[in-house]
Image: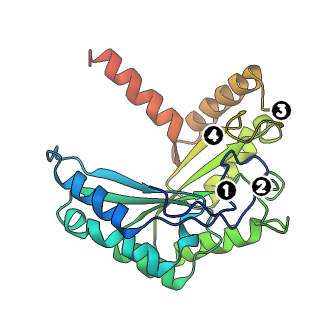
């Protein structure tokens, strides 16, 4: 679900074409989806409603609450879980209270330490790194668990260990990696090569074996689940 197309950042690798337009989702759309989800058979496993953007928190707290409200009956019945993927720059005490009140699971987009996060800039071209860390600090202060997703470009692809050490220090429960690619309006940057990606994942696997207490790596977890399904004949 995309509550708004607009984003308060202008990441240089972003593939979304409408992030400078302030289109907003109508509560009627959220109501229609909630009704449709309510008509599905209850599988016993909650359906994930993922709010992303743009920057979903840029829609504002009042509007975001209005979009969450139609799902309240389903959420309280354990039929759905809310998730939000945010750049964390807009997170405040009151946002944390809202997220906690609706049990919204949080994912933060951050690409690593300052040097690797340099592609994440605001609309004036200023680095967003310090604001991202302030938002993460707010989440930790309020006891809100969070995951991390990082975009891996040609610089970070050669630094998997440093990247994992930093992301682990943030205190999230899992990390995921999106290797930059030519997609959408991101057509003029050279992405990492297949060979670089292979070496990156090899070193990621080695590091995770050496650090069993570190946050789970999304892709490693998914690969393990996939192999388990194959081995069990499912």
> Where is mark 3, residue-wise?
190
> Where is mark 1, residue-wise?
110
Which type of secondary structure does the marked residue at label 4 adopt?
strand
In-image side of 162 versus 22 (left or right):
right
> Where is mark 4, residue-wise?
178
CA gap, disc 1 and disc 2: 7 Å
Q: Are marks 1 and 2 in contact (CB under 8 Å)?
A: yes
How busy is the neighbourhood of tag 3: few (under 14 within 10 Å), some, or many (20 plus)?
A: few
Q: How many marks?
A: 4
Determine which of the numbered discs, if any, sits on residue 117 in the image.
2
CA gap, disc 3 and disc 4: 15 Å
- The quarter of the displayed image where residue 26 is located: bottom left
Lower sequence index among marks 1 and 3:
1
CA gap, disc 2 and disc 4: 14 Å
Eyeballing the image, is 93 above or below 26?
below
CA gap, disc 1 and disc 3: 20 Å
- Nearer to us of marks 3 and 4 is 3
Which type of secondary structure does the marked residue at label 3 adopt?
loop
Q: Are marks 1 and 3 in contact (CB under 8 Å)?
A: no
Q: Nearer the viewer, residue 134 or 70?
A: 70
- Nearer to us of marks 3 and 2 is 3
* Residue depicted at x 29% and y 64%: 31
CA gap, disc 1 and disc 4: 11 Å
How busy is the neighbourhood of tag 4: few (under 14 within 10 Å), some, or many (20 plus)?
A: few
- Point out residue 30 in the picture as x, y percentages from the top left corner: 35, 63
Lower sequence index among marks 3 and 4:
4
Eyeballing the image, is 193 above or below 139?
above
CA gap, disc 3 and disc 2: 17 Å
Q: Are marks 1 and 4 in contact (CB under 8 Å)?
A: no
How busy is the neighbourhood of tag 1: few (under 14 within 10 Å), some, or many (20 plus)?
A: many
Lower sequence index among marks 1 and 4:
1
């Amino acid at each position: 679900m995309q509550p708004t197309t607009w984003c308060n950042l202008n990441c240089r690798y972003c593939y979304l074409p409408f992030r400078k337009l302030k289109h907003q989702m109508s509560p009627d759309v959220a109501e229609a989806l909630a009704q449709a989800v309510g008509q599905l058979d209850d599988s016993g496993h909650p359906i994930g409603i993922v709010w992303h953007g743009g920057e979903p928190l840029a829609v504002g707290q009042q509007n975001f609450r209005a979009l969450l409200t139609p799902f309240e009956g389903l959420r309280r019945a354990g039929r759905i879980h809310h998730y939000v993927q945010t750049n964390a720059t807009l997170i405040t005490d009151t946002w944390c209270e809202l997220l906690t009140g609706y049990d919204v699971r949080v994912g933060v987009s951050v690409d690593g330490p300052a040097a690797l996060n340099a592609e994440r800039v605001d609309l004036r071209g200023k680095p967003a790194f310090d604001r991202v860390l302030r938002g993460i600090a707010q989440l930790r202060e309020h006891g809100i668990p969070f995951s991390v997703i990082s975009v891996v470009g040609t610089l970070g692809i050669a630094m998997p260990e440093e990247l994992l050490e930093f992301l682990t220090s943030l205190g999230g429960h899992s990390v995921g990696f999106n290797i930059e690619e030519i997609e959408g309006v991101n057509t003029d940057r050279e992405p990492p090569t297949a060979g670089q990606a292979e070496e990156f994942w090899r070193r990621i696997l080695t590091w995770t074996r050496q650090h069993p207490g570190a946050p789970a790596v999304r892709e490693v977890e998914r690969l393990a689940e996939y192999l388990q399904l194959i081995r069990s004949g499912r």
